[in-house]
Image (tube, rainbow, N blue to C red):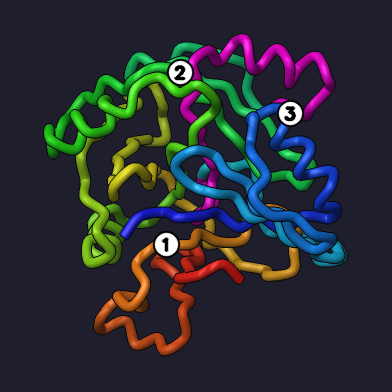
């Protein structure tokens, strides 16, 4: 399996579709008054309308478990960020050189979903699977922003790894954040061209809540067809929630 699509709840499809076209160079595959399906090279983003009356439970605090952000590989973080900044798009973090030899920046879409630009190939502090790292590097520099990963904060990495292993995700590398007093570490699980970026902290974390009608990130859609749901999951419908509250689906809603 791999990440086929990410579903984001939006108040206005046209506004959000225009945003992803302008700042992430997304290509429109489908659109009507209730949804839009956008191509981001290695995955799609599905925008679906909600009325926006339910407040989002998401917090801009990485100690909040569950979904954190969506990352996109880019050729030039500073160039793309300049467009975002000049238009007054809400910013979370201006461009900086991060651990692992990449240049990153964070900003918000119109409904509060946190997005990341990532320039460069990660130089892992610890490599768990060199073949998967080589496959990642082989994707090269994208012509336009390419979906790369979904980031999630978890309580226990081993439990997360055990959950995702039957779905085809394999740990291929780790980055240490030695300067972070919270005991921050990032580990990466790869399946085909998609990655789950797993945050762990020694500090106490807060549980997450999924509100289906709230604006912002909703769920990850995995490919896999008849393999879904995973054997032994005890789930009959095509929806599974991982140990930290990330919602996974087997098809676009």
Q: Earlier in the sequence, mark 1 or mark 3?
A: 3
Number of the front mark, 3 or 2: 3
- Determine the image quadrant of residue 3: bottom left
Q: Tell me the element at label 3.
A: helix
- Please say if the residues under marks 1 and 2 sit with CB atoms less than 8 Å apart: no
Q: Which mark is residue 119?
A: 2
At 29% from the left and 50% from the top, the residue drawn is: 191
Q: Does residue 80 show up magenta in the picture?
A: yes
> How far separated are the C-alphas under marks 1 and 2?
25 Å
Q: Which residues are magenta?
A: 63-91
* Quadrant, the C terminus: bottom right
**Residue at image x 67%, y 44%?**
28
**Mark 3 to mark 2 CA distance (whole Å):** 18 Å
- Label 1 sits on residue: 222
At horizontal 22% and vertical 61% (from top left) the residue drawn is: 165
Describe the element under mark 2 as helix, strand or loop.
strand
Q: Provide residue 156's location: percent of width, then percent of height.
A: 31, 56
The reply to whether residue 200 is in sight is no
Residue 203: x and y in percent read 42, 44
- Tell which circle, 3 or 2, labels the residue nearer the N-terminal end: 3
Q: Quadrant of residue 68?
A: top right
For marks 1 and 2, the one nearer the N-term is 2
Q: Observer-nearest residue: 72 or 43?
A: 43
Identify the disc placed on residue 22.
Answer: 3
Gap in angstroms between the C-alphas marked 1 and 3: 26 Å
Which structural element holds mark 1? strand
């Amino acid at each position: 399996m791999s990440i086929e699509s990410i579903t984001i709840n939006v108040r206005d499809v046209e506004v959000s579709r225009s945003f992803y076209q302008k700042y992430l160079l997304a290509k429109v595959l489908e659109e009507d008054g209730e949804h839009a399906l956008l191509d981001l090279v290695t995955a799609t983003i599905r925008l679906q309308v909600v009325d926006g009356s339910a407040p989002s439970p998401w917090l801009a605090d990485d100690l909040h478990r569950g979904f954190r952000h969506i990352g996109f590989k880019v050729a030039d973080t500073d160039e793309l960020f300049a467009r975002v900044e000049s238009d007054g798009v809400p910013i979370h973090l201006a461009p900086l050189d991060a651990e692992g030899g990449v240049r990153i920046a964070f900003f918000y879409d119109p409904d509060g979903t946190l997005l990341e630009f990532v320039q460069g190939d990660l130089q892992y502090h610890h490599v768990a699977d060199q073949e998967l790292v080589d496959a990642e590097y082989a994707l090269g520099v994208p012509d336009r922003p390419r979906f790369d990963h979904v980031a999630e904060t978890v309580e226990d990495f081993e439990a997360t790894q055990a959950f995702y292993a039957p779905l085809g995700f394999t740990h291929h590398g780790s980055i240490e954040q030695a300067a972070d007093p919270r005991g921050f570490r990032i580990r990466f699980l790869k399946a085909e061209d998609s990655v789950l970026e797993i945050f762990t902290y020694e500090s106490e974390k807060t549980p997450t809540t999924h509100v289906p009608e709230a604006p912002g990130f909703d769920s990850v859609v995995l490919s896999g067809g008849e393999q879904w749901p995973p054997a032994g999951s005890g789930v009959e419908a095509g929806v599974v929630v991982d140990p930290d509250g990330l919602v996974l689906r087997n098809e676009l809603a």
